[in-house]
């Protein structure tokens, strides 16, 4: 009885911290203690509630104040039978024992011997105090709790559902843990973080450990690394991508969508055009999860390929991979493909800020859903020319526009090549939403839902981020009714403000634009259509491809007033169009605007001089053309080529297995094949460049149709677009060389800095970049069909000794 009386006195001290209204519970507390304290561990090393240890009376506030704040709450009914750690003190544990012939439990707080701590894994007190504390004090080694003050988060509502049961759960990315406590009104939640660079929460032994020793089961989601960027605050952002086959508008997952719009948001429901179609999804989403990070963060994306028969790689479109060229995601150039059933972990620095995207680089997987947005922010004070031009930059204002076929892209491609069927655009989706094609409900009315909706407040300048890609030649014109557009950036690079704002802008495959919608009139309680219409293979002479979203002000949920309903014709904008400093043959566009990159932002870091002016060290002419070939059996085929050569991948990655590269592996400007006018030439087309050279590319489509163009993307670099020109008729490459060498092609010294540029049919583009990123870098048309058919080449920058070596045990492949 001495034992329990000592415990009772200590417990009464705890009760004094509660308010006077709880005083009447003391009697029941006394009865509770008398019923439950009589307990002793079999080996005699655990004493029952013995708080008067050699170091004196213990402070019980952390035990009862944090672990079980409501003394009447029967915690054991929630936990079940077993032994559980007591939060706040590693030297105790809670034991719950179910009473015989009853649903009730006996609850005991058990105190370990003075020199021992509770072992969470083995459920006994056998840890010496010199070892790490599994739970509770959190002071040993690298773990602290924000100066010992619990950091409780009330803002991240998206992760509140973590608390579905009491206990300790790793934070996303295992940056710390979440403690969930049961209360009469639900669960209380506190967040704790590991201190020290490179330490993560180890779920196995409840300690903070070096990152290399931790396998995290809860990757970072887009909300975790989405934050106000601060200089010096760099984090590791973890994602887990599971790539698998799926289907849109599944009756299993989508219920009664779209008749019941709530069903369209059910878990696993992918609406993607409003039609049932096989697709490729990441984590059962199209588009895949958005990557949100700050410049300088480390991105760790684990890709699990669960496709039954196709390999996978993912290219991070917009990142330069200066420290990790082997993470660029190009099969047989920077890595081996990720085969079905295999996993590959991408780890790289978010080295370029701006609006970017990621997508598969094998076959047509990106066309069928393997894509997503990648937003890399930086501190606002490092965004030259953007101060005051926007106020809010929210993730819900992403505008990811994608061309969407009615059938699988492989089927579309086979029809084009084998049946000579002219490819035509079919539909557009915005953030995976929007009905494509002509679809009607049971009453004969056109289906238009679900569609994307953007919410804003009047008087606030919001930054929108538009991204576009297409499997065919289908540039899009984007506009918002009742608004002009302040264009902030192109391909991630800030540009100067213009005195006159355009009413629309045009994007080709792989391009991005950041902009601020600026209303012309009243916006209070109003809504406006966001319109997108396709050009060229998507124009009104084909399928009149168009799509829309809705911009709503001040939580207004009514109809869009004073503007015509969505249609291709109503999406035409004949005013000023911002089209990224290029000529697109478009009779509707009366005038156009050029973009001028903010001065010195080629690399906005002091001490780095990347001059793009002067005489280039190397000028390379690239002819982009469709060429006709006749096989031995008399079968004719038309292929898109660069300099008369079709790209053919090697059997192993050139970058990571460079010791195997020889003249038989690649064809360069020094050993290129001959007689390519009369035969089909295929090889690993490579251009060798010295490290540090100023390179000028003259990219020409000498005889293409005026309504067909090629958006070219260069991996590993940004280039300056110094000239774009459209000829009135077909031209030869010799004529182009003559004009360029005699400086007869107009040039723009303030041309924009981009990584993707459109070359119009019967036109050219001249771009410049400093070749200071050693490696093998792909250059290709970003129309996925053209790339798949061979419209690509490869730049080898520097010698093998200049290139960053791959990590130890990096995957290898090749012929056997």
Image: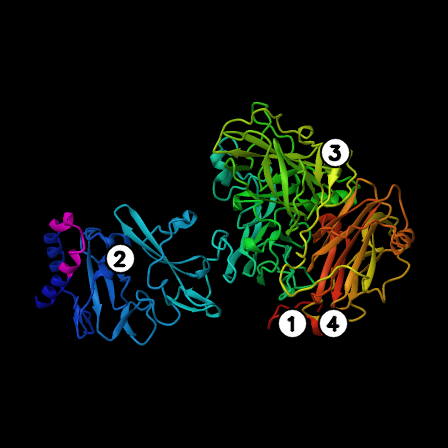
Magenta span: 11-24
Look at the numbered disc 3 and give the secondary structure of its residue. Answer: loop
Is residue 170 among the parts visible in the rendering? yes
**How much space separates mark 2 and mark 1, taking CA atoms?**
51 Å
Q: Main secondary structure of the magenta part?
A: helix
First-in-chain label (1 vs 4): 4
Q: Which residue is mark 1?
A: 805
How far apart are labels 3 and 4 at the CA level?
48 Å
Quarter-of-image position of residue 123: bottom left
Q: Is residue 810 above or below residue 268?
A: below
Q: Residues within 10 Å of mark 3 (few under 14, many from 20)?
A: some
Closer to the N terminus: mark 3 or mark 2?
2
Q: Nearer the viewer, residue 438 or 178?
A: 178
Between 105 and 769, the residue placed more toward the observer is 769
Cβ atoms under marks 2 and 1 closer than 8 Å: no
Tell us which disc is closer to us: 1 or 3.
Answer: 1
């Amino acid at each position: 009885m001495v034992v329990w009386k000592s415990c009772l006195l200590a417990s009464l001290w705890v009760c004094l911290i509660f308010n006077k209204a709880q005083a009447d519970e003391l009697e029941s507390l006394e009865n509770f203690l008398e019923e439950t304290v009589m307990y002793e561990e079999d080996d005699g090393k655990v004493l029952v509630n013995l708080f008067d240890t050699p170091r004196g009376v213990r402070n019980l506030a952390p035990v009862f104040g944090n672990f079980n704040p409501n003394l009447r709450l029967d915690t054991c009914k929630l936990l079940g039978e077993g032994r559980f750690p007591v939060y706040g003190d590693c030297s105790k544990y809670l034991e719950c024992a179910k009473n015989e012939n009853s649903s009730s439990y006996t609850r005991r707080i058990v105190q370990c011997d003075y020199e021992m701590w509770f072992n969470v894994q083995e459920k006994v007190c056998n840890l010496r105090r010199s070892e790490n504390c599994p739970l509770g004090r959190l002071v040993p080694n690298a773990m602290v709790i924000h100066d010992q003050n619990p950091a409780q988060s009330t803002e991240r509502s998206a992760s509140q559902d973590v608390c579905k049961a009491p206990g300790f759960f790793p934070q996303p990315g295992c940056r710390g843990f979440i403690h969930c406590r049961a209360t009469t009104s639900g669960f209380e939640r506190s967040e704790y973080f590991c201190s020290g660079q490179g330490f993560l929460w180890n779920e196995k032994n409840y300690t903070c450990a070096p990152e290399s020793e931790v396998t995290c089961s809860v990757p970072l989601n887009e909300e975790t690394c989405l934050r106000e960027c601060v200089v010096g605050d760099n984090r590791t952002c973890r994602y887990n991508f599971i790539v698998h086959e799926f289907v849109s508008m599944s009756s299993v997952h989508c219920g009664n969508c779209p008749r019941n719009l709530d069903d369209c948001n059910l878990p696993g429901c992918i609406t993607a055009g409003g039609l049932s179609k096989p697709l490729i999804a990441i984590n059962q989403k199209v588009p895949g999860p958005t990557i949100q990070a700050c410049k300088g963060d480390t991105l760790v994306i684990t890709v699990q390929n669960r496709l039954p028969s196709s390999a996978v790689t993912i290219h991070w479109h917009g990142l330069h991979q200066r420290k990790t060229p082997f993470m660029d995601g190009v099969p047989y150039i920077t890595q081996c493909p990720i085969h079905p059933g295999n996993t590959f972990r991408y780890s790289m620095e978010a080295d370029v800020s701006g609006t970017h995207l990621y997508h598969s680089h094998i076959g047509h997987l990106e066309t069928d859903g393997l894509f997503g947005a990648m937003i890399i922010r930086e501190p606002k004070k490092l965004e030259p020319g953007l101060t005051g031009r926007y106020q809010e930059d929210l993730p819900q204002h992403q505008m990811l526009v994608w061309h969407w076929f009615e059938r699988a892209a492989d089927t579309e491609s086979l029809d084009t090549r084998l049946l000579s069927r002219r490819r035509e655009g079919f539909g557009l989706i915005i953030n995976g939403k929007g009905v494509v094609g002509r679809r009607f409900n049971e009453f004969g009315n056109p289906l238009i839902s679900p569609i994307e909706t953007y919410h804003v407040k009047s008087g606030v300048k919001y930054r929108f981020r538009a991204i576009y890609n297409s499997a065919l030649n289908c540039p899009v014109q984007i506009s918002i009714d009742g608004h002009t557009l302040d264009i902030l950036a192109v391909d991630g690079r800030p540009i100067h403000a213009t005195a006159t704002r355009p009413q629309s802008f045009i994007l080709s495959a792989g391009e991005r634009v950041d902009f601020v919608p600026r209303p012309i009139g009243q916006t209070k309680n109003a809504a406006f259509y966001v319109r997108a219409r396709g050009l060229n293979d998507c124009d009104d002479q084909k399928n009149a491809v168009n799509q829309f979203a809705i911009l709503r002000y001040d939580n207004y949920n009514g109809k869009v007033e004073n503007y015509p309903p969505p249609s291709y014709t109503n999406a035409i904008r004949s005013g000023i169009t911002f089209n990224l400093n290029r000529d697109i043959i478009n009779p509707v566009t009366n005038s156009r605007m050029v973009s001028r990159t903010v001065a010195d932002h080629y690399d906005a870091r002091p001490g780095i001089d990347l001059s793009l002016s002067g005489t280039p060290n190397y000028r390379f002419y690239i002819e982009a053309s469709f060429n006709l070939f006749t096989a031995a059996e008399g079968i004719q085929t038309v292929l898109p080529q660069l300099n008369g050569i079709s790209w053919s991948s090697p059997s192993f990655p050139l970058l990571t297995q460079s010791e195997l590269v020889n003249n038989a592996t690649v064809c360069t400007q020094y050993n290129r094949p001959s007689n390519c006018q009369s035969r089909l030439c295929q090889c690993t087309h490579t251009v060798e460049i010295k490290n540090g050279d100023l390179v000028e590319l003259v990219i020409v489509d000498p005889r293409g149709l005026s309504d067909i163009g090629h958006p070219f993307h260069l991996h590993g670099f940004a280039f300056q677009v110094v000239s774009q020109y459209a000829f009135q008729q077909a031209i030869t490459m010799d004529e182009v060389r003559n004009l360029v060498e005699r400086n007869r092609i107009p040039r723009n010294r303030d041309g924009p800095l981009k990584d993707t540029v459109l070359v119009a049919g019967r036109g050219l583009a001249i771009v410049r970049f400093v070749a200071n990123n050693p490696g093998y870098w792909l250059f290709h048309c970003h129309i996925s069909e053209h790339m798949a058919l061979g419209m690509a080449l490869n730049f080898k920058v520097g010698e093998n000794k200049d290139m960053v070596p791959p990590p130890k045990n990096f995957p290898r492949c090749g012929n056997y």
